[in-house]
Image (spheres, grey):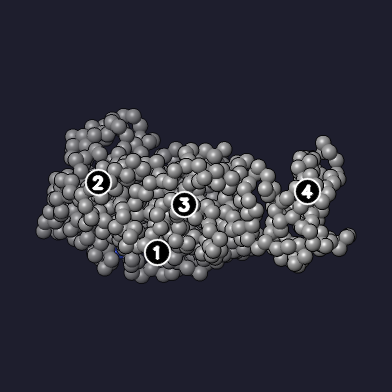
Amino acid sequence: MLETKGLLTVEDLLGYAPFRYEDRGNVKPIAQLAPGEVATVIAEVKSTKLTGFRGRNLGLVETIFTDGSRETLRGKWFRPNGGYLADKFTPGLKVALFGKIELDNYTGDLLMMNPEDEIIGGDDSEGDIGLHTGRIVPIYEAAGKVTTRVLRSLLDRILGSIEPLQDHFPQVVRERLKLPDRWSAIRALHFPGPGADLRLLNAFRTPAHWRLIFEEFFWLECGLTLKRAKARVQPGIPFELTDRAREKIKAMLPFKPTGAQKRVLKEIAADMHTPHPMNRLLQGDVGSGKTLVAAEAAVIAIDNGYQVGVLAPTEILASQHYLYFKNLFQKMGYVVALLTGSSTPREKTQIKKLISEGLVHLAIGTHALIEEDVEWKNLGLAIVDEQHRFGVMQRLRLTSKGKHPDVLVMTATPIPRTLALTIYGDLDVSVIDEMPPGRKTIITKHVTDEQIEGVYSSLKREVLRGRQAYVVYPVIEESETQAIKAARQMYRHLSEIVFPDLAVGLLHGRLKTDEKETVMDAFRRGEIKILVSTTVIEVGVDVPNATVMLIEQAERFGLAQLHQLRGRVGRGAEQSYCVLVTGKLNEAGRQRIRTMVDSSDGFYIAEMDLRLRGPGEFFGTKQSGLPALKIADIIRDQEVLEIARSEAREFIDNPPSEEALRGAVGYIRQHWQRKYGLVQVG
Ligand code: ADP
Ligand code: MG
């Protein structure tokens, strides 16, 4: 049961932080209790009776307690198998009770309903102060049937029976920041001393909390810094941005690049020029024009005589990129190839052969591109699109196909900067923070299911004005089949009943590649006016004439995903609309939808999404490369993270001694994978 929470060793348990604390220190004699207050009472059992049915599931245990004063206190417990409790509470037994004081309607006595109880002075505990009552107690997340109470006892016993743990933390840092030592911090984490401040405890801001959070971030940042430093000194390709390449880029560009695109390309070209491998994250909101920048970088690499690989997460996006690059590179005579899971075996063999002979300048693909048997003559630049869908491992698998090629990772998920630096801490970051000119803000509306008819009429009006529209259904991982069924049904409904005179198309993940392509082509050419789809269009699709994005059951999507979907429209000069259709919403749902209606700023939305859902869900899978943190929280503890980062950099760059550095590197090596679930460093 402990294993379900990743608790396999004593050390794991010691690091299992309470998620909150409760003050049970308010110990009062019965005579001083007032109804409504929460208190701890230490008293003796006077009498106990069990009503309800023995052997049946529920019993009511009623015990009268006294502490020598004239008043008595009643405790009532509804318990399955109440007999156990009734037998335990024999007269004379000394018990500590914690709970809310009420007034018994029948007897007028003071009463506690289902209080937390703890036998005092028996074998169970020592002295009058309990473990579960009479103090500030830690509350843990239960692990299966291992309750917070059991965990508390377990930790108490462990802390009482093992030797103090060694502190691996660099002493200079500890002294400078006046951090408590590890052992005291761990003890105070689980069992705060009598003077502890409940507010600080629950804010995770006691010195003990701060130290443990800091420590977790510190080692993580040290590892990332080392990884980065190591990549920095590896030999790489010094690409030249020659005048000839400049001319080619100029001739290729279909429009004037934005200031941000120019700046970012400059950063990339400078990085490519160094004789070490580039490891760069290109961040930019949906529609900010990352692909164009990637194409420019590709020209530099190809002009230097190298090949370029582009890794895309979906087949639709891969073929979209294929068309885009082919079109751009036509004049230069560069050969562009597409390799996906659904290429025929013959096509695959042929394309692989061309890649290995160096006859393909740029190859685009899905996972097929990183398969074992794809060999490159001289891969010089690896571009990975929509990084958050790929694990770090996959990125490495593509780059291992060349001799230290440059790597450009593109993501449209606007990850807050602190987070980006943590997840991609080994990468440099370039940001496109400007949209291509002439974009109008997309108007976002929220409607409920009942208002759908009105939405359909406006949609029809847009189509009759020559525009196109998407209608999207949520795909829930486990029930893709169901979502496809819903999309099919809706497709039939829309094409036969609502818009019988308009061309409606259907797109979903189970279609064969050529079927998908046929539908996408027809939509691109404007032959299909309304495209009903599951979320396969989420990333990358680019049809400027589409101005309406209608999202059904919008409450089932994450905010980041809604933002991605919305980014499919608003790509041309026309006013675009995004309509979020939902059922009845709870407060959290309303807040999320309101965020979408109010803001079109991807960074703000991502920040909100993170806050509302937490990083784990935000990034979806374990594959995300997000470090598994035990006590630290990337959002709550941002300011600690900042300090840990600069301390870690300083420590690695200017270690106090050779020995301290060696010790740290050893510690990180040993703990990296297990602690953070990250790929081995150096
Ligand atoms: P994303 O960053 O989401 O990948 P894209 O690269 O797909 O964005 O670009 C979005 C759209 O904007 C495309 O239609 C692209 O051709 C267009 N675009 C890119 N850069 C510019 C620019 N400087 N001026 C005008 N349009 C641009
Ligand atoms: Mg893109």
Residue drawn at x 77%, y 45% is 89
Q: Give the labeled residue for mark 3.
A: 186
Is residue 550 visible in this depiction of the protein? no
Q: What type is the residue that disc 1 sits on?
A: Glu
Which x, y percent locates residue 122?
68, 44
Query: Residue 376 appears in which quarter of the rendering?
Result: top left
Between discs 1 and 3, the one toward the N terminus = 3
Specify few, some or many for label 4: CA neighbours under 10 Å numbering under 14, 14-19, or 20 or more: few
Frontmost of labels 3 and 4 is: 4
Where disc 2 sits, the SS reads helix
Q: In the drawing, what numbered circle is on residue 92?
A: 4
Where disc 1 sits, the SS reads helix
Q: CA distance from mark 1 to mark 4?
A: 53 Å
Which x, y percent locates residue 262?
24, 64
Where disc 4 sits, the SS reads loop
Which x, y percent locates residue 292?
28, 57
Specify few, some or many for label 3: CA neighbours under 10 Å numbering under 14, 14-19, or 20 or more: many
**Does the CB distance between marks 2 and 4 fall below 8 Å?**
no
- Disc 2 residue lies near ligand 1 with CB under 8 A: no
Query: Residue 454 appears in which quarter of the rendering?
Result: bottom right
Q: Give the labeled residue for mark 1.
A: 639
Q: CA distance from mark 1 to mark 3?
A: 21 Å
Closest to the observer: 90 or 198? 90
Q: CA distance from mark 2 to mark 3?
A: 25 Å
Between discs 2 and 3, the one toward the N terminus = 3
**Does the CB distance between marks 3 and 4 fall below 8 Å?**
no
Closest to the observer: 382 or 483? 382
